[in-house]
Amino acid sequence: MGPLKTIESKEVHPMDNLLRMDRIPHIWCPGCGIGLAVNAFATALEKAKIDLDNVCIVSGIGCTGRVAGYVKLDSFHTTHGRAIAFATGIKLGNPKLKVVVFSGDGDLISIGGNHFIHAARRNIDMLVICVNNFIYAMTGGQVAPTTPLTAYATTSPYGCVEPPFNIPYIADSSGAVYVARWTALHIRRLTNSITEALNKSGFSVVEVISPCAVYYSRINRLGDGLDMMKFYHDNSEIRHWEDTKNLDIGFQTKIIVGKFVDRQRPTYNESYNKWLSEIKGTKDEG
Amino acid sequence: MKADPKGILAGTYDLSGSEACVEGALAAGCRFFSGYPIQPAIEIMQRFLARAPQVDATFVQMEDEISSLAALLGAVWTGKKGVTATSGPGFSLMMEHIGLGVMHETPCVIIDVQRAGPSTGIPNRPGQGDMMQARWGSHGDYEIIALSPSSPQEMFDFTIKAFNFSERYRVPVVLMSDEYVAHLREKVIIPPASEIKIEPRRYYKGPKDKYLPFKRDKDLVPPMVDIGDGYKFHVTGLTHDDRGYPVMNEECQEFNVHPIVRKIRRSADKIVEVQEAETDDAEIVIVSYGVISRVALKTLEKARESGIKVGSLKLITVWPFAEKRVAELAKKVKAFVVPEMNYGQIVFEVERCSYGNANVVFIPYGEKEVDNTDDLLSVIKQAIKEKKVIKGITELHK
């Protein structure tokens, strides 16, 4: 069997050089925010003026896990939760590469939570874009580690009884050097944050609060994608440098967005190479 | 291709199996290690770290064995050769990424220093209980290559062999060592670089815009490219077409997964390797692998001294299994005696490939001492007395 038929399209999209147009239409539902996050990422790649040959994108599993497949870069669709671990190997294997992990909240914070905190602790130089839609969408709307308390999901028919994780707080306390959160509505600010983070050296996290119009909104009777955007418009508050421990999100409560952390500390590569040359130095002298 | 002399400490040394294994990896051009501490495999990690500055290798101690193998797979796509080392509990955690390695067709080497299981078992007691796990542990259909060393010298030689197989067939290769072999200290000869043959990575050489990541060559192995070479390729663990794009249908499942299995099966004759001793006139053949093959050879000597015609078939590659050779021998011999440091794994393969033509006698770890030549000999003496062909596997007890 050869390659399957390519869909011909005569219309040209400004992002054509960054997207795999032969894979369109994508799998995301109407009203989903992942496409907006991809748009922001693609624009940021252009703005950051990085040689695209040196950018590598890694995704895990889930709706957001499909991003790697639609972006025209060296791209890897890996296993559930392990995108950061896989990307760690890529960054250490070739430190010249700009490595981006693009995945969802369930993938990165639940099954991949351990890899997330350890990559942050080691300060592996990579950008993690975490699309948070408060739910496991691809499997049909189950409770995620980010589902707000009392929110409905197919595995919380009487309302979620577990408190959710506050992603910027985990990233901050684990040692990330750059932490920001925006909603899918804040496209311009989100793009700026991703651009900034792309030029940052160290473990950077950008959380994107995104509507899941089909699973999260429907079961919680929150309307469609547009209603969610309206909600973000009315209820998000920009508070740069806010202490990350104040960033909890409740069910339909205010969402605090902004850039919370921007600092510098040695990356794993820098520390490892320093160790390597020190050892060599002592050997040479001896 | 000749080996890069930079990583090779040519000469004769007293090395443990673990140390020899690291020297083998470095000789094969391996410059990346990601792992998680576990007994009895920890010496491999420590030796690699000690040697890393001398060869500019990259090392990372990950948060668990899941991420260790994930990181290794990532590093390989940047052009590095990489290795990880673990033991049973860690090997269980690696199953997920053995599957990904198979699906992404990523060459890499995993050292499993086997200990007694299941679960935590006895961390410093040797075992051979992961043999079937190496073959079947990850879900879905696949074929894998596994080698079983019986000495520090073989830890060195087979590690190089493992890298060569992994590059040749783009498949994870497992070195099924055990606590005995890893901790055993013996003379190891490291040949000069000019005498070590290295299988280079097969890179795509055609025009950039024509590159298809999973278009196979005549051996069903697709050529690779590195991240950062400007190909902007996609690789997924989903069933994919030759562009690497996911396609969720029956036709693509056949297109994608069947060749992953066939590329190994079709080349099994080139991969399978055994070492035979005195099988020409043997009535009983001891089938063994790993450290137990040392006991087998000693037992063979003793048996021959007392006039019993015993031969030895030592499996160097455990997977793919030496089906043809076992089937041929089954027609000639009275029985196979299979001692294993487990309660029965490879013996099932021996029985399958005997097709009822020879008796199959299993010696489990503990019942008889598989590492005791007298016990082995007493089983052989019982086996040789048996007049009729017995269906299935016979387990002989004291």
Image (cartoon, helix red, strand yellow):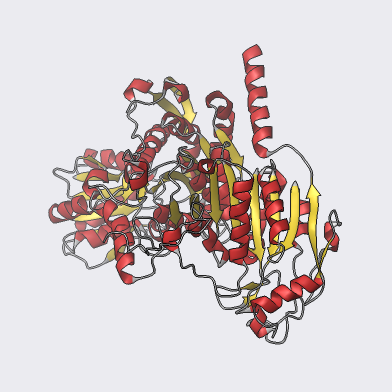
Q: Residue A145 appears in which quarter of the rendering?
A: bottom right
Task: From the viewer's perspective, tell me whether residue A235 is left or right of residue B217.
Answer: right
Quarter of the figure that contains the C terminus of chain B:
bottom left
Using the image as rendered, state which of residue B71 and residue A136 is in the foreground. A136
Residue at figure coordinates x 47%, y 59% from the top left: A12
Percent position of residue A228, x then y? 70, 76
Task: From the viewer's perspective, tell me whether residue B356 is left or right of residue B102.
Answer: left
Q: Residue B47 appears in which quarter of the rendering?
A: top right
Percent position of residue B348, x then y? 31, 61
Residue at figure coordinates x 33%, y 66% from the top left: B253
Residue at figure coordinates x 58%, y 35% from the top left: B46
Q: Residue furthest top?
A: A285
Task: From the viewer's perspective, tell me whether residue A128 is left or right of residue B385.
Answer: right
Q: Is residue B201 visible?
A: yes
Quarter of the figure that contains the N terminus of chain B:
top left
Using the image as rendered, state which of residue A89 and residue B54 is in the foreground. A89
Using the image as rendered, state which of residue B35 and residue A90 is in the foreground. A90
Residue at figure coordinates x 46%, y 57% from the top left: A20
Percent position of residue B303, x then y? 25, 43
Q: Is residue B124 visible?
A: no
Percent position of residue A268, x then y? 67, 38
Q: How many marks?
A: 0
